[in-house]
Image (cartoon, helix red, strand yellow):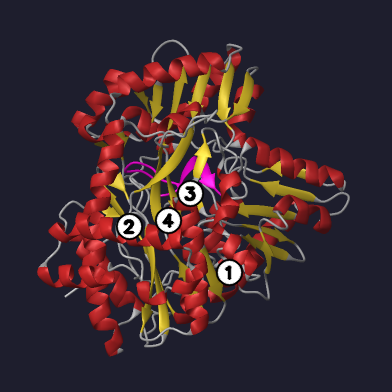
Amino acid sequence: MFEAKFQTFDDTANPAATAPRVTALRTDLAKRGLTGFLVPHADCHQSEYLPASEERLAWLTGFTGSAGAAIVLMDRAALFVDGRYTLQAREQADTSLFEIVHLVETPPHQWIEQALKTGDVLGFDPWLHTVEGAERLAKACANVGATLVPIEPNLIDELWKDRPAPPLGAVTLHDIHFAGEAAETKLATIRPEIAKLKADALVVSDPHAVAWTFNVRGADVSHTPLPLSFAVIPREGRPSLFIDGRKLGNDVRHRLEELADVRAPGDFANELSALGKAGKTVRLDQATAADALARIVTGAGGKITKGPDPIALLKAVKNPVEIEGAREAHRRDGAAVVRFLAWFDREAPKGRLTEIGAVEALETFRRETNLLRDVSFSTIAGAGPDGAIVHYRVTRKTDRPISPGELFLIDSGGQYQDGTTDITRTVSVGEPTAEMRDRFTRVLKGHIAIATAVFPDGTSGAQLDSFARQSLWQAGIDFDHGTGHGVGSYLSVHEGPARISKLGTAPLKRGMILSNEPGYYKAGAYGIRIENLVLVVEGPAVTGAEKPLNVFETLTLAPIDRRLVERDLLTDAEIAWLDGYHARVRNSLAPLVDVQARTWLDAATQPLG
């Protein structure tokens, strides 16, 4: 009945291959006189999600998460992952070869100072590290008398004999009906920003920024419609776009050539070198520009300035067309999620449903909208203890039945031309325990605290993050991930520069879309997360207010499991929010679903009373 077309459940990890690969790398290091080599989860764009040809970290270590790095020395090796991936890393990597290190608590540059000694030489690929990242690593090496040296080509590429070919996904035009603004207008907005930065040209190293600027989308990366490419936008004159011509149909090429000089990727380094030889000042994005780019420009005699790419903020603040598209996409997506939840409530208690079965069903309900272009990431569907693995991805090997008495966490999203969605719901299968209800309600209180926050314009995500944790902290518990991330418009489900986290320093501006997703994870038992997407909008007028105020409009529409709510832990205001949200969900989605789902929806959204 159900099937997944946009995601697979194959387990690509091959633990048996890890040891010989590490041995081969160490043999190569010895031949080159190197003490060690850095292997980040990165490509030359610093992408979060990589094409298969760039998954060097997974090839070497077996770890398949979206963030991490490895350092292999002659006598020891470390795999660095953040709190989302600690359990996954221990399961996928050979811990007899790799010590698992917390990426935030002990980042690679700190580990280097503990592990290296005078005279050691550490190799790195300058295309896979940012300028600041390379500077940090070089300083750490220098602090202990070691040296960081660039190595090209990448040592892993030399060893990876069956490495997949680079992707050649077709590029499509993103119609003004969805983009809301012509590419010519965007370029006209970007150029004054380059002038403000006192730069002669901006290197656009983030493919998301390329896609947004030129109103195109691609198919080079799973679940994110990206055309892997670079661009150079001069303060005056025509931009240059560097992209493999095999990705471009005639209509797309014609449109892009109206906007820019379309050139082969191999010409990119020559363009940078020419800018350097002309003594130009080139702006590099501190978040995505490779150290190699700076080396090319400065090596040819040019200057660089580092800092945020101005396109990132322009892209993050959605225009009115994108905002209305997001609302429509969430109504459509919410109806699909309601159909799934109604079906799940019928099927899960029978004891025959598995995690993969749930993923396939939800994707099918989304595809039946006839407007789904892809899922926005591989669905996270964790039953019982699997729910405690924050970024768990079910495989044929790990698939487990969803049993009565368990919690089931499902985090998923869709890519539609008018918007990108991301929603997490945690549901009870059978009767939850008192502890489950307590923890769920504390997570809900944090979710409501973010949803109802009123904050001055310019407030950062870091200033709001603790709102989501207060009730958890009172019980001596917490969650080891950010509360929210930015979301693109038919682009990446994870978008900067804004986020709601301890590290979220970017101001939240009206028009930004972010997630609101506090959680709690009890290792080996269950996981809880409640996630909606929210839009920053102007707040209501407040008498005597001295600053403009903002609030969040919740975009996501789907019931929150009332069976897991401990009513006595909620304040009257929190109950009113939940009842009001459920009334809105019911009124918005009832006309979009079938009678059976509508009956379930009506029951699932009744007031707590």
Q: Is residue 124 magenta?
A: no
| CA distance for labels 3 and 1 | 22 Å
SS class, disc 4: helix
Q: Amino acid at mark 3?
A: His
Q: Amino acid at mark 4?
A: Ala
**Badge nearest the viewer, 1 or 2:** 2
**Extreme residue in the front direction:** 543
Q: Which residue is mark 3?
A: 485
Q: Amino acid at mark 1?
A: Ala
Image coordinates for residue 531, horizontal then vertical, percent: 42, 59
Q: Is residue 487 magenta?
A: yes
Say which quarter of the image contains residue 589.
bottom left
Are the residues tagged 3 and 2 within 8 Å (C-beta)? no
- Quadrant where the N terminus sits is bottom left
**Camera-nearest residue between 434 and 373:** 434
Residue 89 is labelled as 1
Q: Amino acid at mark 2?
A: Gly
